Every structure is written in C-alpha cells, then in structure tokens.
Amino acid sequence: MKAVQLIDRARRHDGFAIPAAVFVIVVLTLVALAGLYVSQSNATANTGIRLSLRALYAADAGANQVIGTWTSSRYRLLDPGDSVTTLWRTLPDGSQYQTTVLRVDDGRVDSPPLYRLQTVGRPGQTGTAQRVIVTMVKVDVGVSTCCDAAMKTQGALNVMGVGAGVKVSGIDVPPTTWSGLCDPDRSDIPGVMMRNLDSLTVTGRPVFEGTPPLDQDLSIDDSDFTQFGDLTYEDLTRIADKHFFGTTLFDTLLPETDAEGGCAESVPTNWGDPANPDGACWEYLPVVHVAGDLKLTGAGIGQGVLLIDGDLEVTGEFEYYGVIIVQGKADFRGTTNLNGGLLVRSGISTSELSYLRGGTTLQYSSCSTARALARANVPRLLAGRHWFEVLD
Amino acid sequence: MMDLRMHRRRRGFTLAELMVVIVLGSVVAAALYQVLIYQQRLYTQERSATYRHDALRLANAVLSADLRDASASEGDLVATSPDSLSLRSPVGFGIVCAVDSGGGKLGLFNIQGRMGELEGDSLLIYHPNGWLVRERETESEEASSLNCPYSSGPAVELVVRVGGLLTGIPAGAPVRAFHRYTYSLEENRDDWWLTRSDGSRTEILVGPFTGDGTGLKFAYFDAVGQSTTNPARVARLELTFVAESEPYERLDTLTSTVRPRNQ
C-alpha cells in the first residue's frame, strides 16, 4: 500500500526540470545555428568566388585551345556572318567551356578575316558559376608566301638535263586533273630565279620556261625564305598539321580513308589526294613540317605546304601540288612532278649546291599554290585589345 | 482526516526544496547567460569578419575586372600611383558591321553594356593602323539605317553617330566603350571607403578600409617582373586591401595579382 502511494505521488508531482532542460537545449541550438549560419555564409561567398574564378580560367583556356587548333578546324571555312559552336569540352581539371566562333568581317579579299570567339566557362560538375569572355582574332592567310618563280633559290644550283630530263616552267598551267575546278591567274613568272646566275651550272638540255625562263635578283636574301608578308616561316611551322622531327624518310605517301570512308587525316603518310577531286582527301591540304632533313625514296603523292628545316632529297617518284619551302638545300634526282612553287633557301651556306636532275618537272601553277596557301591560316589575337569580358 | 493531511503535504514545497530550485535555476541561468554573451560576441565578430571579407572580395572583384580588360600599352592605365589608379574602365562592348564614313555612323551588333550614352563615356574602335578614340554624338539613329553585310547571321542592333574620321574601320572591328575612373580611398564619416571618381562625380563602392595609408595599395610590374612607374609598361599589378571593422578593431588583408589580358 505504501509503495502504491509513493508511485502515485511521484506521478502527480509537477516538476520543471524537463521544460527547463528543453528550453536550455532550444536556446543553445538556436545560438549554435546562428553561429553556423554566419560562418557558412562566409564560406559560401568564398566558394562562389573560387568557382567564379575557375569558370573564368576555363573560358580563358578554352579560347586559347580553340585558337591553338585553328588550322585543323572548320572555323577557317566560315562565310562572313556564319558561326559554329563547339560542344562542351572538358579541361584536365574538370572545368568546361563552350566556344561560339563567329566570322565578323565582310569577306573582302584585301583585309584579313576577323572572328569573334565567345567562350563560356564553367567550373565543372561542382558548381553553377559561369563566366563569358570574348576574344577577337584576326587570321593572316599565307597567300603572299609564293611565288616569284617556279623555283627561287639564293644558293648554287646544278641542273643536269640528261636522262629523263629536267623541266622548270614559270608558265601558269593548272594541273591536268583539275579541269573546271580552278581558273588560273595566267600571269607567267620566271622559271628559275636566283640571286646570282653565275651560281647556275647547266649540263645536258634541260627546259626552262617562263617570263623570263631564268632570272637574277641580287636582292634575294634569307628573308625571302622566312618572311612572307605578315607571315613568317615560324608561323607556318606553328600551324602545321603534321610534324616530323630529325631525319625523316618516307618510301610511300598515299591518301588513305578511314572505316567510314572519310579522309584519314591522322595517318602520317596521308598528305592529301590532289589527283582525285572526287576523293575523300581532295579537300585535305595539310601543312607538313619536317624539323630536319627529308628523304623521299619510294612513290609518293601529296598536296598542301611542305616546310623542311633541313635538306630535301628525292630519289623516288614524288608528285606534289602546292608549295615546298626548303631551308637547306634540295636534291631532286628521282622522278619529281611539282605543280606549284619551290623555294630553296640554302640557308646553311650560300655555297650549298642544290640539284635538279633525273626526271624532274617543276611546273608553276597559281591554282595549286593558291589552293594550298588558302589553308595556311595563322590566327592572331587582335593587336592592342582582343580580350573582353561579357558582364551579364 | 488522514487524507486531508496528506493532500496538504502534496500541494506545497518545503523551504529547502525552494532553495535548491532557486540555486540550481540561478546556476543554469547564469551559465546560459554567459553562453549567450559569449555567443553574441562571437556572432558579432563573425559578422564583422564577414563584412570585412565581403569588402575585400568586392573591392578586388571590381578592380580586377577593370584591370583584366585593360591594355597598358594602348594607354588604358592613365595614371598610376601607389594609392590610386586612373584607368579607362570598360562599360560596354560591341562589334562594327557597317560603316558610313560620310555620315559618321557605325552600325553595331553584339551590344553589351552601354555604348557611350553617358557624359564622359568614350569609344575605342579597332582600326588596322591602331585603335581610335571617338566620342559618341547624342543624336539617336534608327537601327535600320545601316545593314550588316552578312547574308545570314547578325543584324544591326544599334547605330551610333560618332565624331571624327571613321575611314578604314573594317567590318568586324570591336568597339569598347569606356569611362575614365580613378580608384582611391576617400574618407566619409570617419571611415575610409573605396571610391570611383570620374572627376565630376564620386561613388562610394565598398569599405571600410584602414585610413593610415595601408588600406589600398597598388604595385606595378613590367613584363620581366621589375617594378615600373611607366603606365604603358605595366604587365602585372599587385593589389593589397586592408579592411577594418568595429567594434573590435579587427583587420583583414587581401593581396591579389592581376595580369591585364590585353598585352
């Protein structure tokens, strides 16, 4: 009976410990939450700044990446007012960018093409920040690179017109397989142009054609082979689609297609298909750079611009449409058919001797040179100011 | 009788019980008060720190944005000193697609910001021979009075009448509108604030910063990292801000480096 009374008493006793404890807990929780909120708002602001900067750097890097891959892209083929937008691309740090390239010039041939690159940068999956920048780009086209002559050189030249014969012609003739595809300038140029014709040795009966067939220009110097209007040789090497280092030897150069029937541009021995206007590689005119000597021993065909830092030696059958620039000396002693223009600097020493022998034909063609050089585009940031941030 | 006595005992508290409750309650209340006071101080400090950090972030963002767009070699940094900087602050952007040289008009698209509407605004226009500085004239023009030369693509959004020669400006030339501002610290109600002044009007941007000469500092470096006093040679700037806050006299410092992109 006593135990029952005690329990009953305890039940009915009105205490305040639990309400007081709950009150204290609530107050402390509110205080802690307030402190957490203040700290978190600061941290959130810092995170926002960090993500925003990351987005800006992504936009910056993206614009540079687009400019760096200009030559191998489709941007150069845009008509004035047309634009192309890249897919969202992810950078190594996970940030992303998307660039819209808009051609903004009016297409006049006497002024370089201008492009507006609007690049949106985002920090990646981790945030919603976004920054937009505009980069203005001017594109120098290498049309002034070539040609004053079918062959221009400042060194000594030995032409051996025996056997299959040698022909150098500055008469503007389009390639025979390009009928209806090109309207040549029909402005003939010299066949061979040298700084000093006394350095020319001729044996046998080679054919020289042009206006005049042989020409001398005492003003020829190194700059004729390294500076082409607004472009330099270095500019051209920088935009090359294919690079080879050291002494490079090819016994085969042939156009190749991939599994889908497209041109397999990544194949090192695919230098385009100038003989087949309907082929997949007809529109592929690569700028090829050899940082050393180049030796062509077998059968090869190609088009575009060929840049050789060292010497060129052709002992096989080589058919090329476009412009060849050799900084060293050249020795054609196989069977060569060049439609376009050849520049041989003999830059190591002006006493260096180049050879035209075997069955070598150097035929100037404004169609070949113009088509090749139109692809040699060098994008440059607009002088003075090229970078603008778009503040929404 | 017995039930009545028990009922009386249940309804009250003894003095000892009351004393225990009062003492315990006082201890709990005092502890809670201490916690609240401490927390309030902490909260105030945190809030002050947040204000200081906000001031630093905002000041840095405003100046960095202006400086990134600047071209020192083209004269955008007008006057440089350790505690102030005058520059051509970008306020708008557009691209020329049509030029009426005789009429002194430019057709623009891709307009962002304002294109020289305010007094003191000027336009920088790309020209192959060098950027032109031009003033916009106030007359408004119909956008349809000029056309972009594109068969498809952008159309003229704005036609502006501009003073001075426009010959040789190509289609596609970018135009940057700018307003010359001087950034420095100015005192207002006993505090020092980052301000932006164009000579006729001064705007208080953010603050407060320390007023002993350390609140805002600019250091200028050329392309090889040497300190320079020549505005045209500046390739990198170092900005230092020191923000302060009441009531605990706390300071926070932010130093950042900005490289103008247009070099």
Image (cartoon, coloured by chain):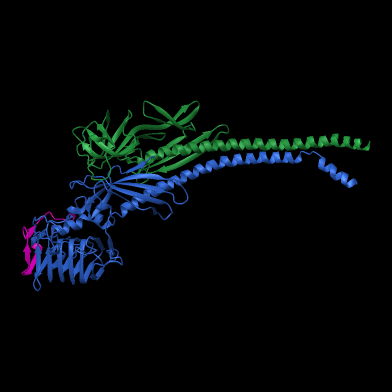
Chain colours: A blue, B green
The answer to which quarter of the image holds residue B260 is top left
- Quarter of the picture containing the C terminus of chain B is top left
The residue at the point 47 percent across, 39 percent down is B57
Question: Along the line of sight, which residue is nearer the eye, B22 or A19?
Answer: A19
The answer to which quarter of the image holds residue A186 is bottom left
Q: Position of residue B27 (x, y in %)?
A: 75, 37
The residue at the point 18 percent across, 72 percent down is A316
B81 left or right of A113? right
A253 left or right of A180? right
A44 shown above or below A76: above
The answer to which quarter of the image holds residue A278 is bottom left
Magenta highlight on residue B243: no
Residue B19: in sight, yes or no? yes
Question: Along the line of sight, which residue is nearer the eye, B158 or A201?
Answer: B158
Q: Position of residue A147 (x, y in %)?
A: 14, 56
State the extent of the magenta-drawn residues as a range.
Answer: A198-223
Question: Along the line of sight, which residue is nearer the eye, A122 or A203?
Answer: A122
- Quarter of the picture containing the N terminus of chain B is top right
Magenta highlight on residue A204: yes
Q: Position of residue A216 (x, y in %)?
A: 8, 57
The residue furthest bottom is A163
The number of discs equals 0
Q: Position of residue B15 (x, y in %)?
A: 85, 34
Residue A225: in sight, yes or no? no
